[in-house]
Image: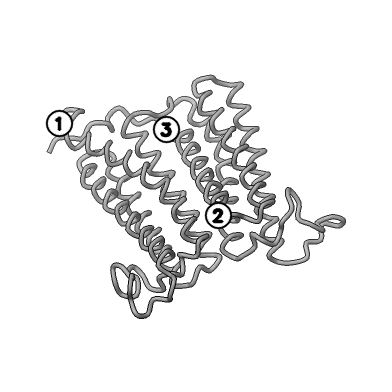
């Protein structure tokens, strides 16, 4: 078929729609958990065995908001799953098929992590894993959408960007995991100062495990910020093709650190924590864009039947 075939246009539309849906879904999930909605429905995928729990006899009094948030999050995630299935169908006769199948498998795995996050009553490791793989899904979907639209960086600089940005990206993902575990384990409120915890000095003796978990998240965040800004500075000096992307990623890190500090100093209010999670997802998306190699010329069009 020609490049402008229906299947190819559908693939572009589906991939962009998935990006636009996954990004707020990550923030939505954080709000659900922070508002107590994560335990509003003790079973999965339904709520008290029903599509909607409103008015159910076993439903706790006054739990309608939490249950509505939780089920709303599940419904939006279901729509994302349907979009990913549609992407696989649209990409089946193209060289994007493996990408689309891989993304679908990631989304299915993420859904199962969501199940265990609920059934294990928001255990810290499940919250951290769910947040991590949600962002990994977002990164792959962003990369897929850029490749489908050929909005990718030129190939010759890919290796250079990889050497500079992958360590920074790895530290960013580590920070995400520790942030999710900090929130899921209840450690968010155990380090009210910033950037250090109260009584951290002298001797760097952190008095409690929860305070140590919180402080480890800050150490990782500081390390990720320093390594990323250094990598961006090196990229700025070596090439000028993506200076807008470099500036955006650097500014996002500064905004993220500011949001984290404000959340810690104001006892982690829900709106700030939600913005903190969304900004982290934006950073992951920009990393994905910076690390996405150019799509091969033969990969763009959907092949003829």
Q: Residue at x 20, y 28 (%)?
A: 3
Residue 270 bears which disc, if any?
Answer: 2
Give whichever of discs 3 and 2 has the lower sequence position.
2
What residue sits right under mark 3 in the picture? 293
Q: Secondary structure at mark 2?
A: helix
* 271 over 115 or under it: above or below: above
Q: Residue at x 54, y 65 (%)?
A: 125
Query: Marks 3 and 2: CB-CB under 8 Å?
Result: no
Residue depth check, mark 1 versus mark 2: number of the one nearer the observer: 2
Report the side of 97 relative to 137 (left or right). left
Near mark 3 (Cα within 10 A), the count class, few <14, some 14-19 or many ≥20, is: many
Inter-mark Cα distance, 1 to 3: 25 Å
- Coordinates of residue 232 in the picture (x, y in percent): 60, 30
- Coordinates of residue 220 in the picture (x, y in percent): 65, 49
* 252 over 60 or under it: above or below: above
Give whichever of discs 1 and 2 has the lower sequence position.
1
* 1 over 194 or under it: above or below: above
Q: Secondary structure at mark 3?
A: loop
């Amino acid at each position: 078929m020609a490049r402008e075939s229906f299947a190819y246009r559908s693939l572009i539309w589906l991939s962009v729609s998935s990006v636009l849906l996954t990004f707020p879904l990550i923030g939505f999930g954080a709000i659900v958990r922070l508002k107590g909605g994560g335990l509003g429905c003790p079973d999965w995928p339904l709520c008290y065995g029903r599509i909607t729990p409103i008015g159910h006899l076993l439903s706790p009094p006054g739990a309608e908001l939490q249950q509505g948030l939780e089920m709303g999050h599940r419904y939006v995630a279901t729509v994302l799953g349907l979009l990913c299935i549609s992407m696989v169908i649209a990409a089946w006769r193209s060289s994007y098929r493996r990408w689309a199948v891989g993304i679908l498998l990631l989304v299915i795995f993420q859904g199962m992590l969501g199940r265990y996050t609920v059934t294990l009553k928001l255990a810290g490791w499940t919250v951290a894993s769910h947040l991590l793989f949600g962002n990994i899904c977002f990164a792959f979907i962003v990369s897929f959408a850029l490749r489908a639209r050929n909005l990718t960086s030129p190939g010759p600089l890919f290796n250079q960007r990889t050497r500079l940005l992958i360590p920074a990206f790895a530290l960013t993902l580590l920070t995400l995991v520790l942030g999710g575990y900090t929130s899921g384990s209840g450690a968010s409120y155990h380090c009210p100062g910033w950037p250090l915890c109260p009584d951290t000095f002298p001797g760097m003796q952190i008095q409690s495990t929860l305070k140590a978990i919180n402080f480890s998240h800050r150490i990782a965040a500081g390390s990720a910020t320093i390594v990323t800004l250094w990598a961006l500075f090196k990229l700025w000096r070596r090439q000028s093709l993506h200076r807008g992307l470099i500036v955006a990623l650097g500014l996002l890190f500064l905004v993220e650190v500011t949001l984290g500090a404000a959340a810690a100093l104001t006892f982690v209010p829900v709106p700030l924590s939600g913005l903190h999670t969304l900004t982290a997802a934006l950073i992951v998306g920009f990393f994905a864009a910076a690390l996405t190699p150019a799509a091969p010329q033969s990969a763009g069009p959907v092949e003829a039947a």
